[in-house]
Amino acid sequence: MRFHISTLGCPKNVVDSEGMQRLLLEAGYEQAPKPEAADVIILNTCGFIDVAKEESIDALVQAALLKRPGQALIAAGCLAQRYEADLQREIPEIDGVIGTRHWPEIVDFLRVNGYGLAVEKPLAPGPYPLTPSAYLKISDGCNAPCAFCVIPQIKGPYWSKPREQVLREACQLVAGGVKEIVLIAQDTTAYGSDRGEKDGLAELIVRLLHSVPELPWLRLMYAYPQHITPGLIETMARHRPVCHYLDLPLQHAHPDTLKRMARPHNVGRIRRLISDLREAMPDIALRTSFIVGYPGEIEEEFQTLLDFIEEMRFDRVGIFTYSQEEGTPAATMPEQVPRQVKEERHHRAMALQQRISLENNRKRAGKTLEVLVEGAQEPAGKRSASDHGSSLLVGRSFRDAPEVDGLVFVTGRARAGEIVPVLITKAMEYDLWGEVDDTQGASNPLGTPGLLAHRAFLDIH
């Protein structure tokens, strides 16, 4: 019995897909490289905003059209959780639906629906081959009351993964060759709050680094500003493996807009937080995201956002046009902003941030950054182990989160999985170019050869 999983949506969805993959492999299923070669196709869908929903529905329809006799099509993920009855009515070729809260039951789910193994031959549990970076989900669900978001309805209330389980999974990742662990959740900074912990994330970081002292990089994503404590800032600044990088989903900068969003609206506090972060870590890279065209957003409010972006000079900014999601308070608010206005504001905000990003990147020219190499392309005619010709390397500095930020393109010699010093020679809007600084030598703390087979993500159970 062979399976194929296709994933749409955010990194948290990819975590769930890799969890299903692990469970199926351990149960004795085989992984098919393409959907047409599989007995069971699992489409892990996204239902967060309209564009994501349309992409997921299109993918399900396409899979249904190509489905052959005897092949099973399973809809999983957020869209499946939210619209189970509608999907099964509109796309009858779907053989089963499993939502975000039940994917750990995938093996039993397939068995009950007639797609179990004739003879089970369980594999020994992992570790599976990994790439240099891996996501590790530390919690799921969300308690935030944001007026524009359906995640709490889909994922349920916030709950933290047991600390010992997080540490065990981190040890497995490092043993498999991972050089960078990226902690993710709907809100990483709320970790432990459901258990009454006051500084749970800071404590988790200290325990994790003690468990895997050889880990070079630890990165934090989705850090809600209202939950960032002085203890967390001090922990990030004190422990070298913690990347001086933080992703702060601020959503807007005008107090009135933030109030309508049901978000924290003390913008002065946000300014002080950013000041505290930069004082504790002068080299910190800050990423954020904003929504433009939210209901009731007038030109004055949008201009306040532009002024804030100019003032704060974030390293990375994601700009999203507001999407009217059914079942949310924002969807029924008056003064919905016309599509053309939303698109025009999106363009203006992106153009501003593109200029700032280029100016920020130009400050890196002439400096040396450590770069985690993710891939290498051998130059033409240079294939022997004794060659000393340069390769074109692709990697990331501590300033770049995997899959969402820029890249560093490097000439020189290194293997995937190595961390090498790179002298930056050229800056672009989002990416950097440089050359390996051979005078400083490469860092390969784990002693592993790198070039590992595929990115792995751990499940939430």
Image (cartoon, helix red, strand yellow):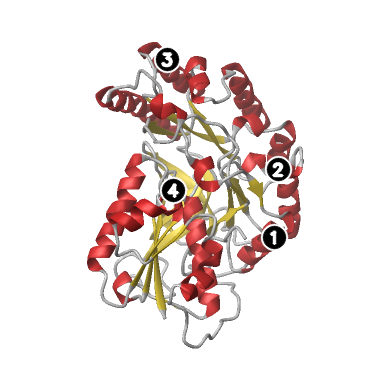
**What is the three-letter code of the residue carrying label 1?**
Gln
Image quarter where the C terminus lies is: bottom right
**What is the three-letter code of the residue carrying label 4?**
Arg
State the CA–CA distance, disc 3 to disc 2. Answer: 35 Å
Which mark's residue is nearer the viewer, 3 or 2? Answer: 2
Q: Residue at x 52, y 19 (%)?
A: 259
Which quarter of the figure has residue 72? bottom left
Residue 407 at x, y percent in the picture: 42, 47
Which quarter of the figure has residue 318? top left
Which mark's residue is nearer the viewer, 1 or 4? Answer: 4
Residue 74 at x, y percent in the picture: 39, 65
**Residue sitting at the far bottom:** 119
- Residue nearer the viewer, 54 or 172: 54
As drawn, is 257 to the left or to the right of 242? Answer: left
Say which label, 1 or 4, has the lower sequence index.
4
Q: From what the image shows, is residue 74 above or below residue 398?
A: below
Query: Which residue position holds label 1?
Result: 165
Which mark's residue is nearer the viewer, 2 or 1? Answer: 2
Which mark's residue is nearer the viewer, 2 or 4? Answer: 4
Image quarter where the N terminus lies is: bottom left
Query: Which residue position holds label 4?
Result: 82
State the CA–CA distance, disc 2 to disc 1. Answer: 16 Å
Say which label, 2 or 4, has the lower sequence index.
4
- Residue nearer the viewer, 370 or 413: 370
Query: Which residue position holds label 2?
Result: 194
Which quarter of the figure has residue 284? top right
Say which label, 3 or 2, has the lower sequence index.
2
Q: Residue at x 58, y 34 (%)?
A: 144
Query: Which residue position holds label 3?
Result: 301
Report if residue 59 is visible in the image: no
**What is the three-letter code of the residue carrying label 2?**
Asp
